Amino acid sequence: MILILLGPPGAGKGTQAKEIARRRNLVQLSTGDMLRAAIAAGSPVGLKAKAIMESGGLVADDIVISIIAERIAQPDCANGFILDGFPRTLPQAAALDDMLRAKKLSLKTVIEMKVDDEVLIDRVSGRFTCANKSCGEGYHDRYKKPRKEGVCDICGSTAFTRRADDNAETMRNRLTAYYKETSPLVGYYFAKGLLQSVDAMAGIGEVGDAMNKLLDAPSGPTAAKSSSK
Ligand code: AP5
């Protein structure tokens, strides 16, 4: 199964992608995580991406397209994957179509996560993440606390990080980039009959249930039935 989670910064893409990946034995592919890893490693890609990400802009298409092309060729993606944060522009979507066509693969669905802007700002400002690189579980100061304070539910790590781009000013730029560059993908995938939507204003568990319902539906999505609401 190959699916895309589409939504603005803080919509809950990473939270849900991790859960769906665990349940369904899929790989979560987050271009944001890959770029942050490149920055941490000081690689040439990381050096190019750092200032752009800190400002809330989008990294160049050719960079993210080649990162994803390389990653989906890895054997662990053979059972399927969830794209979280890619594609983010129309050229990225067209490049993904080409990659999948060349591998004789197809997208099962694109799930759009709808959340009001003021809620997005609240979500990113309270976010923190397990610092264990092989875990990276996401949490929130109010909406998703670790079961035991200061200890990651998944891996038991006691170290957590907060993202440099999770501040009000950068968030405004990230939202602008979303509406300008990424929201046209809603129409792109609607026209292909692949788009479904969830009300991602609901709690984490409810949003997950709505997504699972869509993914378990026997027939594929249709343009006419594009909302779970
Ligand atoms: P990226 O890392 O992809 O960030 P993003 O798209 O801005 O999304 P976020 O990770 O901020 O949010 P999310 O939707 O995953 O929310 P989460 O689940 O964490 O990209 C960062 C940067 O990298 C970009 O700005 C760009 O510069 C660059 N980049 C990446 N990909 C690129 C590409 N393809 N092209 C070009 N540039 C690219 O949830 C947020 C918080 O809310 C968490 O604390 C969570 O616990 C909480 N939460 C989640 N769901 C709920 C809920 N239902 N109710 C209450 N709280 C919730």
Image (cartoon, rainbow, N blue to C red):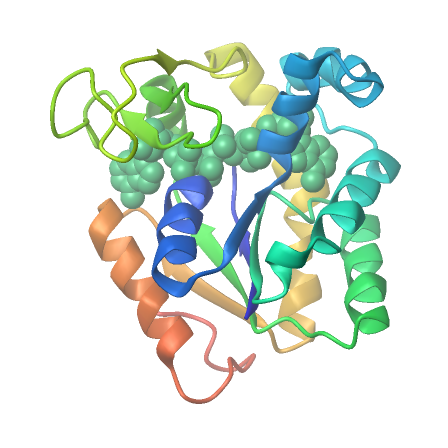
- Answer left or right for 69 relative to 124: right
Q: Where does the N terminus fall, quadrant-wise?
A: bottom right
Quarter of the view holding residue 124? top left
137 on left or right of 179: left
Residue at the (57%, 65%) spot, across then down = 80
Rendered view: 181 above or below 146: below
Residue 144 in view (yes/no): yes
Quick check: 155 left or right of 87? Answer: left
Q: Residue 53's spot in the image, x, y percent?
A: 67, 19
Query: Residue 229, can we see it?
Result: no
- Is 62 drawn above or below residue 146 in the view shown? below
Q: Is residue 63 above or below residue 111?
A: above
In the rendered image, residue 169, in percent from the top left (x then y), is placed at 54, 11
Residue at 48% over, 25% down: 133
Q: Quadrant of residue 131?
A: top left
Residue 16: x and y, percent?
38, 49
The quarter of the picture where the C terminus appears is bottom left
Q: Which residue lies at the image location 69% right of the left edge and 15% below the top edge?
A: 41
- Residue at 51% x, 84% y is 220
Q: Looking at the picture, does residue 38 appear above or below residue 159? A: below
Percent across and percent down for residue 14 are: 45, 41
Looking at the picture, tell me which residue is in the foreground, 191 or 15.
15
Quadrant assignment, res 228 = bottom left
Query: Looking at the image, which residue sits at the far front?
Result: 75
| Residue furthest bottom in the image | 219
Q: How many marks?
A: 0
Q: Nearer the viewer, residue 191 or 38?
A: 38
Q: Give left or right: position of 1 versus 59.
A: left
